[in-house]
Each structure stands twice: as structure tokens, then as C-alpha cells.
Amino acid sequence: MNNDLALTESTFYILLSLYRPCHGYGIMQQTEELSGGRIRLAAGTLYGALTNMCDKGWIIQLPADGSRKKEYQLTSRGLTVLKNEVERLRELVKNGDMILEGK
Amino acid sequence: MADRITMRKWFWVWDFEKEEAWLNEMSLNGWALESVGFCTYNFVRCEPGEYTIRIEMRKYDQAYVDFVESTGAEFIDRMLLWIYFRKKTEKGPFDLFSDIDSRIGYLDRIGKFLMIVGGANLIIGLVNTGGRINLICATVLMYALGRIHGKKEALTKERQLRE
């Protein structure tokens, strides 16, 4: 798959939340907080995304410590994907500002 | 007044949103879904609007149910391939899908299931001389597939412009 493709908002915030180890509900809370309440990840959507990202090697599931809540964390590959996306978004904002604000 | 009621109701596969809306209406009227049977719904008294109900067609998977429960929802019951969840309204909004991609993926999963069951009925119906029932089933399932596909098309169109 083309590596230049944009991430979805959900993907972006999930990866960002996993900069530090976090469980599913924590990802939902962080995403809601970071986006000022704009993005509420639903459980089914999040579960599917986490499964996909594990398959792609962007995140890993940390060994369970006996509790029922599983924690996940970003891998170095996931970190690269995230950094590239921030770079891409910076370009969008730069061009938007240039044309619309005359900056 | 009775504390429990049982209602019998039939929903076609493509009407899963109507089924969910009806269950939420029951909750608003003070009846919380307690268990589900074939075309049978058992309710117990609750505070009006105490729960939000969500249903999903999915092969039962304990890891998934545990995950959904870890986000503050509760598993109610399952019937055939349908899973029923609820969450206390006071704990905040409850949805299973929050973006267009995952909704499309969900409709795909339903479509795949209909195709397998519909295809199997079609083959059995064509091979067996007494397979008229199977042919009728296949027709209904193919119609369902068309309805699901229509819902998916609308989302796909939207997805070309927005997430």
C-alpha cells in the first residue's frame, strides 16, 4: 500500500495516544480530550483499528499483567508513520494559510 | 404493574437500525432489554432512558466483548449472529462505530455473511428438487444484500469527500 496515503483522524489520534502505553478506554479519553470533545472513538471502531495497526506493526500489544484491560504501545515503525503524517499536515496548514491568510 | 414483559417482533436483516431504534425507544419508556430469543425480546423495568442499546452483527468473540465492556458498556445477550450491548446513559454517549470507514467495513461484514448464506441456499435449492424453500430464502437474502449494498454505496460516496 502507498505509504504517502493520509491517515484518518481516528488513526492519527489512536497513534498519538499510544506514544505512551495505554489501554482502549484510555485511548478514547485521550482522543476526546485532545480534540476538545470533537472526536469520540466508538468501541467497535477502535477495536478494529487496533487490530489492523497491530497487523501492520505500527503498535504492539503489551504482555497482560493479569488485568482484563490490554495495553498497547507505538512501535518505531508507528512513530515514523505518525511523524510523516504530522509533516504532511504541516504542509496542508502552510498552504492553507498562504492562500487564505496571505501569510 | 408487571416488572417484566416479553415481546415478539420480527426484523429483517436490513432493518437492524430500526431494531436498535425500537430497543432504545423501549428504554425511554422504562423497559430495559434483559435477554433475547428468536424473535423474542425480554424486558425488565428501568428508569426511563436509563440505557442506550447498541446491536451488532459479528461472530461472537470474547476478546471483543471484553473490550467493549472495558469501555463502560455491558453485554446483554446474543442471538444467532447478533450481539446486544447496553450502557448507562449517565456514563455518556454510546456508539459502536464512529467513522465512515468502520461503518463501511461493518456493512461489508454483513454483506459477506448474507452472500455466504444466500449462496448456500441457492446451491441447495438448485440441486434438490424439493429445494423451493431454499430458493425463497436465497431470494430474500439476495434482496437483503442489495439493501445493505445500497447503504454502503451512500457511505462510499460520502467517503470520497470526507472522513
Image (cartoon, coloured by chain):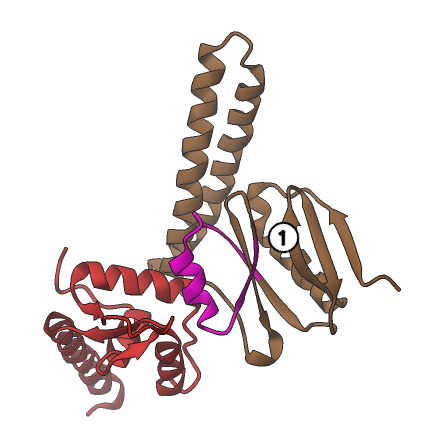
Chain colours: A red, B brown
Residue drawn at (60%, 74%), measured in percent from left and top?
A: B88
The local secondary structure at tag 1 comes to helix
Which corner quadrant of the image does residue A98 belong to? bottom left
Q: Which residue is mark 1?
A: B18
Percent position of residue B130, x then y: 56, 10
Numbered disc total:
1
Q: Is residue B145 above or below residue A100?
A: above
Q: Can the viewer see residue B162 in this picture?
A: no
Magenta segment includes B62: yes
* Residue B43 location (% of width, % of height): 72, 58
Q: Is residue A52 above or below residue B69?
A: above
Residue occupying image coordinates x 50% and y 67%: B95
- Give whichever of B78, A58 is nearer the camera: B78
Q: Which residues are magenta?
A: B54-77
Which chain hosts label 1?
Answer: B
Quarter occupied by the C terminus of chain A: bottom left
The answer to whether residue B21 is visible is yes
In the image, A69: left or right of B11? left
